Amino acid sequence: MTLKQMLKRLSIFLLMFVLFFITNSQNPALAITPQALYDKAWKLIYTKYVDDTQNKQNWERWRHKYDNVIQDEEDAYVAIGTMVDSLDDVYTRFLNPKEYKEENESIQGSLKGIGVQISVKDGKLLIIAPLEDTPGEKAGLKSEDEILEIDGKSTKGITVEAAADKIRGPEGTTVRLLIKRKGEENKYYTITRANIELKSVSTKAPKIGKVDDNLGYIRLSSFISKNAAAEFLQALNDMKDKDGIIIDLRSNPGGLLTNAIYIADMLLSSKVIVSTVDRDGYKETQNSLSKVITEQPVAVLINGGSASASEILSGALKDNGRAIIVGKKSFGKGLVQEINKLPDGSALHVTIQKYLTPKGTDIHKKGIEPDYVVDVTSEDLKENRDPQLAKACEVLQKAVGKATTASSKEFLTIDE
């Protein structure tokens, strides 16, 4: 079955089950006053938020709180942000036009920059990881590199958002980074920015640990790109000769619910994938169709960074007995957001539903429990061992009746 055929069969569900619905009720080119922008945001939460008590507060108190105070768009953005923060829901959030534009670029599968993930830890701006085949990786940047300067400006006290702003830029321009790496002298890197195609799927051998030759390995790092399902389908088709498949969802923060549904449909035949429940208690259930891409045994790797769409996929495969889940308990995000585009080009993410696994389990703040609980210690990483991956190989080899070569029981910590 081609992706085109699969998408055609699933198109009926597109409006019902999108993790990020994008609402374009008004032309963004139309003018709107800052006060009207605030009012629109207030009304969206009042009418759509999954908890009609707005988390046990009087939502009316916000309606006229900033009357005669909001003078321009920046005032409106601050006011909306303050109002949204009162919900104490990290998933309901406001994005200014620039942030929303960047989010859309991620969904489209491309960004302009050097291709590194960054974070601030203990006041230091660190590279989490360079993306594969990007200018950052090709220049030699590595995980845990500390960025001391960006174009001659110190990064002391900088936020992730501000740093990303400085590192990104038009294709063909350069950015100069001063890098501090443990055990080496500080070094300047001048890197040319490019259009970064965000790949969600990799079938390359993992850098740590080993996969048995007769098993396929698919690393799914995100569900955010609209291309994720197509990439996954291609990976499955390329592994038809393998005895079993390992799907690595570790540290995958989620993304589009449609991607999770499409991928689950490739592996499940006429089974429940997920159900959603809105503020009125109305429940909708999404089922897979009858034809599957493969019936190969599957093992799924998860950890505390596996969230949202990752949990939908792993929950669907676990509850239907389609896959063995290995690793650590997942993050526990069981909520669905809708993206509402506002007339000025900004947007408001609003939590509108919670979701349940096929067995009706609400995993919010609870997570998915693995079938095999396996830890990875710092000592394992130093020794180039991945006990979770090894256990996945072991259980798949048992499923296909072969002895494993990748696993090594002496370094596994397992609660079965």
Image: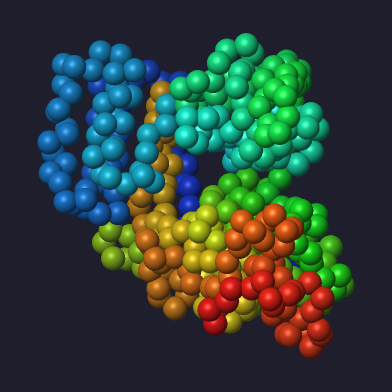
Q: Residue, x 57% and y 66% (percent of image)?
A: 375
In this view, the residue farthest toward the front is 183
In this view, the residue farthest toward the bottom is 401
Along the viewing direction, whichever of 53 and 278 lies nearer the viewer: 53
- Asked if residue 103 lies left or right of residue 393, the reply is left
Query: What's the colour scheme?
Result: rainbow
Choose top left, top right, bottom left or bottom right for residue 267: bottom right
Residue 211 percent across, percent down from the top left: 79, 67
Choose top left, top right, bottom left or bottom right for residue 295: bottom right
Residue 363 against residue 175 in the figure, above or below: below
Q: Residue, x 68% and y 31% (percent of image)?
A: 181
Residue 15 against residue 197 in the figure, above or below: below
Along the viewing direction, whichever of 332 and 338 lies nearer the viewer: 332
Inspect this view and state whether residue 350 appears.
Answer: no
Inspect this view and state whether residue 125 appears.
Answer: yes
Name the quadrant of the C terminus.
bottom right
Residue 311 against residue 295 in the figure, above or below: above
| Tag count | 0
Name the quadrant of the N terminus.
bottom right
- Asked if residue 215 lies left or right of residue 148, the reply is right
Q: Residue, x 46% and y 71% (percent of image)?
A: 357
Q: Residue, x 57% and y 26% (percent of image)?
A: 164
Residue 224 percent across, percent down from the top left: 58, 47
Residue 110 percent across, percent down from the top left: 67, 35
Residue 281 percent across, percent down from the top left: 28, 65
Along the viewing direction, whichever of 334 and 338 lies nearer the viewer: 334
